[in-house]
Image (spheres, rainbow, N blue to C red):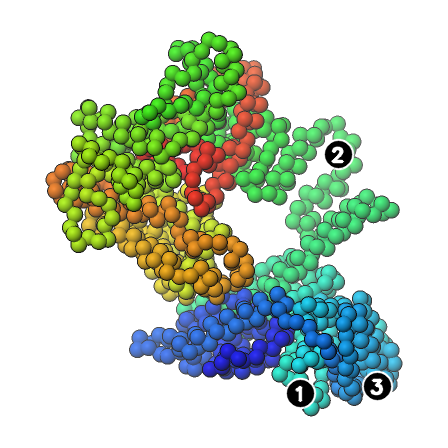
């Protein structure tokens, strides 16, 4: 194996095709090179874009038998496993190239004082011009090797000047050797090419007008022009050269071949290996390429296989390619006519499935993305130019693809004169369209609606009802706001109690709201309350869940509900729970425990109530429960005396664990495994839905509190399928932890001993994971993440500022721990006869049984619901309805527009501290709540 002293060429990013594979053979061996060549991974960027180049060896295909024989060992069960040496070489290669790529970006090398520019144009060229030119004339160009110029350069302009002179000399000698036309080739700076000199980075690049960028190679202190000259005289001719030959009457040939002098090539071979750049850097000129020019561009950027794929589909221009988008969709068709191109583009598995080569897919997708970017830049620059050109007309140029996608634009233009003269008022229609397209350009949680649109929405809801409203809203995106279920802040006067209801109630020493806080006959006092007292934005509900044998199927019932501004402390929660416990004790009812969501204040209150890594709040309380804990239970951290137990809502735990892998600010790292959703996406793309029952919305749901999607991705079938997918061990373990939480606390059919097993399975998974995170150094974790992902090490250090971002959140971890301890404590109490067997009905602790009660509580609350616009059920006339709408519109919409628009779109992944704010939490309770 090569040592660390192996010299990586400076032009490594320019290596393409055979020259790239030659480098791989030197660095990692022929077997690794063959694996990459088989998948058409032909340059550095394509290699780094492929997540796992060895994944192809895990597929069952006869096409892979030869590769597997040399790179794998066959097991007795007829399966193959990759040799450890091959894995190590591939990992070292990726790590080395990633570091080299980062180093080249930073420009860490220093410029020497002596720079040698070498013009290396020893070429025997056959020029092939296939653009309407006859094929019976050949141009034989022969150039002698020019002498090197040794110049001491200190300025960028001097370097450029000598390069320009060298290129002019080369063009001159090519023209002299052409008997038929002495001026067929002339290259001009800033017209045909651009010279880029990086003094600090010690790099010189020549960017051709066709978009290709050639980095001048270096040997010791020598800059070599042969990279750019090869680009001009390659077997795939430069497009600029072809365009210049297009106007020459007598010039033609069959192919353009470059043949350097043997001595020069051998001396130059180790450092100058390619002319084709692996970084696609095209210009807007390529957007107009069609037919042969387009095919030459595809071949140059993506290779011959991609070229054949384009030709098979009759994709003959850039705009046609951008319109189609997915060029690989035709390979999914079942046709014998496509077998030939399929065999070149991928492999057939023994089960009949077809797998595309990773290198081909990466290059084509990168090429299309680059063209899309160029197209967008062109459109923006064109619009800017048209708007800034005062001498030009005010006409707006609409792209053809936009007219095809939205034909109504063309209809609007055609009938614009008739519309302008029409007797109808189009003001409302204009407002609606402007509002819709403005919303469509932003995220859904940022949707805003004009006053007229809000008035129309309210009238539609009143006249048509909820069903008609929802039908129109879902059919026309961004047209109408989502119907809210949130509580809207509103103060009302209750004539029976002479109180103003809707202000946030203060709490007494027991944590309970003071009911008669806002009763006055003074207008100035009321004015002061309106100015200084916050209004209730949340609804706090308390529910009681019976555990007796006669009430196994009894739903929880509401104990109390009141409006709050969601501003309280954990000490208020502890006092409230203790007061409830004492009040029920006076009625001969034992409160077994409390359950709530993952709000940090409730979590802190639970820790204090249980003495779980916190000071115990009920020392020497006369009603403490007690169990006998074995001395050998070193893994059990809860004390043996408790006043009551506490459970965190397992539904919220599952959704929070699911949301953690969707977070854009964290990167879950477990050993050498990056835990993300890529294996699940791969599963959906490559396996039948009958095997896993997943859709993409299950993996990344719009509603972050959607429990059913968390249950589906952690199902037995999904976990079993993940074992067949490479690089899925991390996500497999993570989903098994979520599955264990479900089976332990939510599923009704789980045997109680199995509940304990699954509860502590999730506990020990997270304990071992956290232990490993704590033992690792932060820099080592950053390097590991850079190794298993495509992130730059500096971006990682900037984004992941602490080790906690490699692990689940603090709240989620403590929730899992508390639930497992309380589950065992509850089992011990039942075993010792202190509690009835019905206490083991753990599934009643989750929030799903309480949802209907929450909705009812909102409906009967003192603060108004945003969806209630009726008149106490009484039939009203159209005139009364109109008056109601007129009076209620402003108050109904303007008071809480953000809340209305955020219900479906603003439930983002939880923040690092996962605290509930009033804006996020419109319904909180001590038994369960929707976060």
Is residue 383 something that shows in the picture?
yes
Tags 1 and 3 in contact by the CB under 8 Å rule? no
Q: Can you tell which quarter of the image residue 632 is in?
A: bottom left
Q: Earlier in the sequence, mark 2 or mark 3?
A: 3
| Rendering coords of residue 629 (x, y %) | 16, 47
Task: For marks 1 and 2, give the one nearer the viewer.
Answer: 1
Q: Which mark is residue 419?
A: 2
Residue 267 tag number: 1
Residues under numbered marks 2 and 3 in contact, where contact means CB atoms less than 8 Å apart: no
Pointer 3 local density, CA inside 10 Å: few below 14, some 14–19, many at least 20: some
In the shown orientation, is residue 836 left or right of residue 677? left
Instruction: Say above or below: 572 vs 373.
Output: above
Other residues around mark 2 within 10 Å, as few (<14) / some (14–19) / many (≥20): some
Residue 177 is labelled as 3
Name the residue at 20% across, 33% down. Answer: 621
1 vs 3, front mark: 1
* SS category of the residue bearing label 3: loop
């Amino acid at each position: 194996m090569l040592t660390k002293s192996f010299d990586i060429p400076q032009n490594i990013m320019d290596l393409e095709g055979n020259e790239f594979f030659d480098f791989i053979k030197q660095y990692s061996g022929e077997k690794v090179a063959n694996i990459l060549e088989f998948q058409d991974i032909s340059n550095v960027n394509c290699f780094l874009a492929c997540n796992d180049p060895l994944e192809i060896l895990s597929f069952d295909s006869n096409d892979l038998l030869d590769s597997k024989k040399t790179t794998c060992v066959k097991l007795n069960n007829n399966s193959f496993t990759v040799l450890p040496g091959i894995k190590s070489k591939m990992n070292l290669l990726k790590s080395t190239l990633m570091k080299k790529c980062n180093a080249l970006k930073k420009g860490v090398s220093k410029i020497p004082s002596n720079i040698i520019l070498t013009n290396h144009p020893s070429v025997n060229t056959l020029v092939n011009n296939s653009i309407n030119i006859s094929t019976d004339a050949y141009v034989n160009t022969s150039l002698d090797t020019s002498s090197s110029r040794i110049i001491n350069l200190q300025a960028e302009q001097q370097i450029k000047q000598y390069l320009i002179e060298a290129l002019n000399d080369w063009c001159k000698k090519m023209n002299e050797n052409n008997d038929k036309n002495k001026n067929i080739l002339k290259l001009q700076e800033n017209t045909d090419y651009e010279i880029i000199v990086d003094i600090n980075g010690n790099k010189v690049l020549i960017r051709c007008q066709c978009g290709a960028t050639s980095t001048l190679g270096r040997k010791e202190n020598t800059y070599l022009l042969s990279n750019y000259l090869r680009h001009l005289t390659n077997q795939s001719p430069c497009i600029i050269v072809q365009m210049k030959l297009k106007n020459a009457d007598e010039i033609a040939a069959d192919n353009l071949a470059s043949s350097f002098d043997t001595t020069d090539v051998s001396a130059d071979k180790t450092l100058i290996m390619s002319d084709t750049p692996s970084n696609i850097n095209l210009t807007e000129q390529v957007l107009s390429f069609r037919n042969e020019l387009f095919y030459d561009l595809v071949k140059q950027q993506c290779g011959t296989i991609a070229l054949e794929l384009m030709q098979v589909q009759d994709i003959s221009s850039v705009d046609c390619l951008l319109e189609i988008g997915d060029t690989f969709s035709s390979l999914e068709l079942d046709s014998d006519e496509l077998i030939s191109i399929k065999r070149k583009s991928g492999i057939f598995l023994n089960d009949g499935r077809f797998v595309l080569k990773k290198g081909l897919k990466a290059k084509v997708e990168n090429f299309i993305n680059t063209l899309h970017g160029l197209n967008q830049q062109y459109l923006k620059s064109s619009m800017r130019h048209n708007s800034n050109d005062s001498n030009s007309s005010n006409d707006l140029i609409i792209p053809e693809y936009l007219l095809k996608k939205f034909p109504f634009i063309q209809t609007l233009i055609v009938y614009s004169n008739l519309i302008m003269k029409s007797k109808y008022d189009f003001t409302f229609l204009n407002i609606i369209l402007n509002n819709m397209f403005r919303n469509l350009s932003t995220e859904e949680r940022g949707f805003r609606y004009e006053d007229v649109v809000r008035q129309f929405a309210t009238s539609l809801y009143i006249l048509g009802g909820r069903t008609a409203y929802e039908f129109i809203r879902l059919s026309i995106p961004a047209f109408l706001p989502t119907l809210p279920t949130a509580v809207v802040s509103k103060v009302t006067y209750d004539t029976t109690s002479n109180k103003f209801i809707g202000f946030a109630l203060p709490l007494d020493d027991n944590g309970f709201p003071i009911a008669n806080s806002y009763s006055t006959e003074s207008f100035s006092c009321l004015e002061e309350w309106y100015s200084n007292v916050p209004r209730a934005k949340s609804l706090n509900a308390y529910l009681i869940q019976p555990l007796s044998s006669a009430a196994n199927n009894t739903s929880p019932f509401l104990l109390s509900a009141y409006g709050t501004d969601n501003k309280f402390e954990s000490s208020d929660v502890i006092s409230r729970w203790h007061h409830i416990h004492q009040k029920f004790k006076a009625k001969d009812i034992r409160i077994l425990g409390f359950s709530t969501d993952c709000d940090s204040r409730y979590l802190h209150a639970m820790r204090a109530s249980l003495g779980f890594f916190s000071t115990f709040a009920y020392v020497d309380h006369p009603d403490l429960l007690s169990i006998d804990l074995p001395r050998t239970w070193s893994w059990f951290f809860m004390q043996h005396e408790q006043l009551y137990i506490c459970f965190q809502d397992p539904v919220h735990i599952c959704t929070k664990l699911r949301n953690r892998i969707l977070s854009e600010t964290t990167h879950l790292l477990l050993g050498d495994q990056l835990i993300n959703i890529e294996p699940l996406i791969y599963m959906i793309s490559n396996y039948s839905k009958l095997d896993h029952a997943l859709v993409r919305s299950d993996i990344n749901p719009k509603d972050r509190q959607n429990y059913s999607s968390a249950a589906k991705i952690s199902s037995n079938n999904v976990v079993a399928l993940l074992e067949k997918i490479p690089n899925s061990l991390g996500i497999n373990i993570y989903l098994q932890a979520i599955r264990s939480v479900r089976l332990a606390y939510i599923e009704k059919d789980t045997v109680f001993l199995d509940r304990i097993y699954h509860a502590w399975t999730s506990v020990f998974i997270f304990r071992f994971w956290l232990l490993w995170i704590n033992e690792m150094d932060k820099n080592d974790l950053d390097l590991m993440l850079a190794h298993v992902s495509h992130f730059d090490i500096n971006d990682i250090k900037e984004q992941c500022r602490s080790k906690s971002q490699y692990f689940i959140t603090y709240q989620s971890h403590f929730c899992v721990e508390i639930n497992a301890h309380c589950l065992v404590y509850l089992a011990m109490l039942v075993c010792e006869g202190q509690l009835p067997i019905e206490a083991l009905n753990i599934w009643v602790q989750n929030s799903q049984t309480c949802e209907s009660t929450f909705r009812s509580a909102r409906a009967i609350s003192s603060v108004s619901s945003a969806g209630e616009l009726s008149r106490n059920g009484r039939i009203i006339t159209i005139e009364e309805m109109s008056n109601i709408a007129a009076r209620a519109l402003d108050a109904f919409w303007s008071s809480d527009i953000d809340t209305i628009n955020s219900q479906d779109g603003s439930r983002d992944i939880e923040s690092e501290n996962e605290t509930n704010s009033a804006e996020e939490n419109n319904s909180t309770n001590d038994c369960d709540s929707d976060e």
